[in-house]
Image (tube, helix red, strand yellow):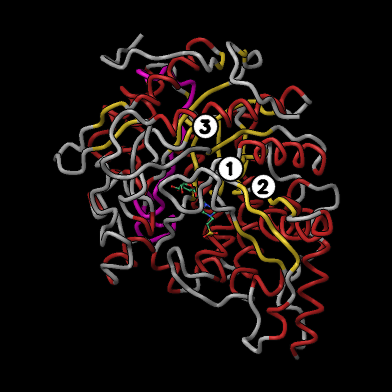
Amino acid sequence: TVRETKHGPRPFPEGFLFGTSTASYQVEGGWNAEGKSENIWDYLTHNNPCIVRDCSNGDIANDSYNQYKRDVEMMRELGLDFYRFSLSWTRILPTSFPDKINEAGIQYYNNLIDEMLKYNIEPMVTLYHWDLPQKLQEMGGWTNPHVVDWFADYARIAFEHFGDRVKYWITMNEPREVCYQGYGAATMAPAISISGFAEYLCAKNLLVAHAKAYHIYDKEFRQKYGGVVGISISAGWIEPETEKDTQAAFESSQFEWGQYAHPIFSETGDFPPVMKERIAAKSAKQGFFRSRLPEFTPEEVELVRGSSDFFGLNHYSTNIVYRDETAEDYNAGPSYYDDIGTTGYQPEDWPTAASPWLKKVPWGFYKLLTAIRTQYNNPNVIITENGYSTSVGDGYEDNDRVEYYKDYLDAMLDAIDEGSNVTAYTAWSLMDNFEWMAGYTELFGLYEVDYNSPQRTRTPRKSAFVYKEIIRSRQLDYHYEPDTTVMTID
Ligand code: GBH
């Protein structure tokens, strides 16, 4: 059960770790600096200048390519145990392939990593946070099965160059968003909408690519370096509208995040049975000669099964879902949501962030962690993202963000009390950044970034002071009121 009172000090478990997160395209800028080549976000934003809400792009973003020392200073101010960031594939491998390694790119990440380690801040590195080389996209990107080898080669290069200092690796950030938003809904680069087909091809290839990278680390690097490798899965909680929708909500969750979690974390592996059944049945009815969902070979099932040392969880919000098979009757052709056969919504009266999809529902976090514990035999969970957006001009008194963090950490502690093996928490984000199709209009930072200043000046919000105290005291205290006059490094 979820606590309902705003309480005094509540400790985190012994050894619990705290971090913040960013991603390369969202903060680095330097889009063509010193040998970097074009990725799918460079291409999309340059060729469709107003596809992003404020007609912006990540050409300069937070200029972290030049401002990384200030970033590390902020990590020290907060007292972070670790910092999660991602590598830009085209900064390291401008041809996409290992035939040419860009030394300036390697140097940039060495500088960042070494600066962090100087102050005992552990790097947690994501290999792929959405910035695929454009060249690979032109060869089909994640829908081309050869992407498995392309990604595995890139992963090996990263392990070779940074593995001596990086002990936490994440292969992929949010496969569901890569595949569904990128190839089904066209709401993310490469902005393809071939729903009902392309996102499933992507899912299979991405999972096998992830597993290949995992096994490369496991066989060739783990003994030497002793690190861990996982994947970050985006999962909202899906609540049934009424009791009769319980099965529908479960099935929806099997498509939305079980699609990626089940092949890795279940005992049997493979896509969830309900997904295989529903898509096969629909495909047959629609006149296809085979299921639109590609199959894993038995060898691939085994390769993917168990290929993660921890369950990286990106969680933000909750949806209510009910059974809705009406889409079947429209002659619109196959689609992901027609395959699922449910409709979701969020009640108007749930507190809403600047991002319309982001409603504060802490009990959903508790229920999701409970479901992961029971469905997958209590894996080690690392919360790799959780956070709240505000709007431009909302100022430094970000009380809504502070309340969101407190309530979500509290719900997480409830799940931990009941046995969930959550060992680390990562706030999204260290600072405001390029929020994909929303540009710079939805701001997730503990630090505000001034996009009118050449250095992209970073200033702590109230939430930064609160998070700092949570980390310092290793407890959550609803009554704590920070003095926000001056930020220090302790
Ligand atoms: C994460 O995505 C990303 O990893 C990060 O880069 C990003 O900046 C951050 O969160 C904040 O958005 O599909 O219309 O129903 C979050 C992914 C986006 C997944 C919203 C669920 C639901 C909206 N989430 N999405 S919709």
In the rendered structure, which amino acid carries the disc numbered 3?
Thr
Q: Position of residue 263 (x, y in %)?
A: 75, 54
In the rendered structure, which amino acid carries the disc numbered 2?
Trp
Q: Which quarter of the rendering shows the N terminus? A: top right
In three-dimensional space, the C-alpha distance between marks 2 and 3, rounded to whole angstroms, equals 18 Å
Q: Which residues are magenta?
A: 76-100
What residue does disc 3 label?
426
Mark 2 or 3, which is nearer the eye?
2
Occupied quadrant, residue 220 = top right
Please name whichever residue, 130 or 253, is drawn nearer the observer in this view of the structure: 253
- Using a 10 Å C-alpha cutoff, classify the residue at mark 3 as few (fewer than 14 neighbours), some (14 to 19) or many (20 or more): many
Confirm or deny contact between disc 2 and disc 1 (CB under 8 A): yes
Q: Is residue 5 above or below residue 38?
A: above
Mark 2 or 1, which is nearer the eye?
2
What residue does disc 1 label?
315
Compared across the picture, whether 41 is left or right of 365 comes to left
- Using a 10 Å C-alpha cutoff, classify the residue at mark 1 as few (fewer than 14 neighbours), some (14 to 19) or many (20 or more): many
- In the rendered image, residue 202 lying in the magenta stretch gets the answer no
- In the rendered image, residue 84 lying in the magenta stretch gets the answer yes
Residue under the image location 77 percent in, 80 percent down = 282
Disc 2 or 3, which lies upstream in sequence? 2
Q: Position of residue 199 (x, y in %)?
A: 60, 69
Residue sitting at the far front:
349
Q: Is mark 3 within 8 Å of ligand 1?
A: no
Compared across the picture, whether 384 is left or right of 110 comes to right
Q: Position of residue 104 (x, y in %)?
A: 28, 43
In the rendered structure, which amino acid carries the disc numbered 1?
His
Instruction: Indicate the secondary structure of the residue bearing disc 3.
Output: strand
In three-dimensional space, the C-alpha distance between marks 2 and 1, rounded to whole angstroms, equals 8 Å
Occupied quadrant, residue 270 = bottom right
In the picture, the disc for residue 95 is none
What residue does disc 2 label?
237
